[in-house]
Amino acid sequence: MRRNSTTLVKAENLDVFTPTGRPLFRGLNVEIGYDQVAIIGRNGVGKSTLLRILTGEVDRSEVQLNAAAYLVPQDLGTSSDSILTARSVLSHTDLAEAGLPIQLLSQEFCSPGEQRSLHLLAAQKARPDLLVLDEPTSDLDEEGVDWLVSWLSKWSHGLIVVSHNRKLLRHFDYFFVIAESGCRYLSGGLEQVEDYLEQEEQRKQREYVSNLNALVQKEEKYERVNNRHDRKKNRGRLNELGRCTARIKLNEKRSYAQVKQGKRKKLWQQRITGAREWAAATRRALSVQLDLELIAPQQPTDTAAKIVEAIDVSAVIQGRQIFSNVSICLRRSDRLVVSGRNGSGKTTLLSLLSGLQRPTNGVVQGDFSRIGLIEQGAANWQSELGLMEYLQLASDSSLDKVAEILAAHRFPFALAERPMQSLSPGERVRAALICLFHRSPAVELLIIDEPTVGLDFVGLAALQDALKIWPGALVIVSHDRDFVDSIGTNCQITLDKKL
């Protein structure tokens, strides 16, 4: 991945593991010069970890860094020190030339999108030899993404970007695809990369089911071995009787052995039974995966009925008026997209409509029990339950039904066993949507904030399919115009930013 002889960063035989010991990369070799490279892959495969290593934030002897690297991470944090650092290198002229309001240098409250803009502008001004951006379109509005794409397309130094944003990725010709099966370099169009990722996801599902079946066979083998061990134990007791061991001593030994072995056998049986049932369910679901279709929840027939209404609502945060005199009436047939510049109050409006927050002025009324909310990154769904367990409890579904649901939504079987709080934000958004699809009583209004942020291509396609067939009301905030157009919306409200 070099267009000239200058090497900015080089990694040789790099092995990277998660804190739990799971391998992310083995024997990775990469060399980058004054190239513009996009790193893509499924959520959770280690893209952000690789960036921290390549920029020297994580010191590794296998990595040779020959130039100053400037990293803008995905998680900017909530510390005011981070904002002050970006502001300290910027001037009113810098913001004006970028089309950003100069008030960003002084206002007390900054939205996530405004913070992102400040950090990206500081990176542009620094002009490092190697610029590294992790999900740079996160939180940016449509105008912000256009601004970012504009100046990156003219960037003449080294550039490494991790992103799932199609508008940004269309400007790249070099892709580094990271997957569990390894890393692969591709050149060409974005469509070629998407096809590769789709095939990789299908391969991974098949491999998971194969490994699960192998585990069940291994457990069954262990059970047979333990049964033979128990039989030998019984013969040992007979030998004890033959040696005329005292009855009281014999009873003590037998009682201890029975309790210990009984507990062990019970736990073993529970474990192997659960693994065997899940293996069979996923195997059956995978074999008919192409025939499975998403099933939308049943909705009341009265599509004109109101679900929630906001009347002349206003919001003030830390003394700053975010918006004022906003009125919305949502009925069962409405599919509303909320748009506006960063800092205009879109997320705040969603909190008001879902009943989580009270307006400064005005009133919001409705039946909030019929509303399902997914905050950005599904932060409100950080449950200790796994998706598989949640679906079993919420809808009283069998394992076969749960496996069919996951296959229809193209959700990885392996991730369904993990606590939702351990999933990546993109994975958790998909898990939350599946939960709401199958909640009882049925949800009548979905409210979703920036669902595409950090979502990989396979997950994005699955999310689009689900929202296309959603029969109830929908309120969505998204700066991804292609995504909004693909799911079909019939009304829009644009919030004006208060300066």
Image (spheres, grey):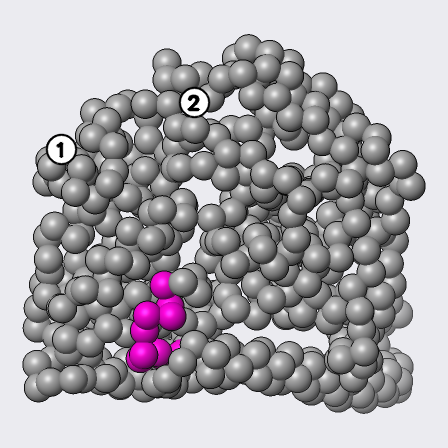
Residue 450 in sight here:
yes
The residue at 86%/83% (across/down) is 234
Identify which residue, 388 or 456, lies in the foreground: 456
Vertical relation: 407 (above or below) 385: below
Image quadrant where one finds the C terminus: top left
The quadrant in which residue 93 appears is top left
Q: Work out how far the residue at label 1 is from the one at label 2, CA to CA, in angstroms.
A: 22 Å
Q: Which residue is mark 1?
A: 92
Residue 173 inside the magenta-drawn segment: yes
Vertical relation: 154 (above or below) 221: above
The residue at 86%/44% (across/down) is 299
Residue 142 inside the magenta-drawn segment: no
In percent of width and height, residue 41 lies at 45, 72
The quadrant in which residue 154 appears is bottom left
In percent of width and height, residue 184 lies at 38, 85
The residue at 80%/87% (across/down) is 224
The residue at 54%/42% (across/down) is 477
Q: Which residue is mark 2?
A: 322
Vertical relation: 414 (above or below) 308: below
Q: Amino acid at mark 2?
A: Ile
Identify which residue, 194 or 55, lies in the foreground: 194
Q: Residue furthest right?
A: 301
The quadrant in which residue 81 appears is top left
Q: Is residue 342 left or right of residue 107?
A: right
Vertical relation: 352 (above or below) 272: above
Asked which secondary structure carries label 1, the reply is helix
Q: Is residue 413 left or right of residue 22?
A: right
Q: Amino acid at mark 1?
A: His
Find the magenta span and give its range. 168-177
Image quadrant where one finds the N terminus: bottom left
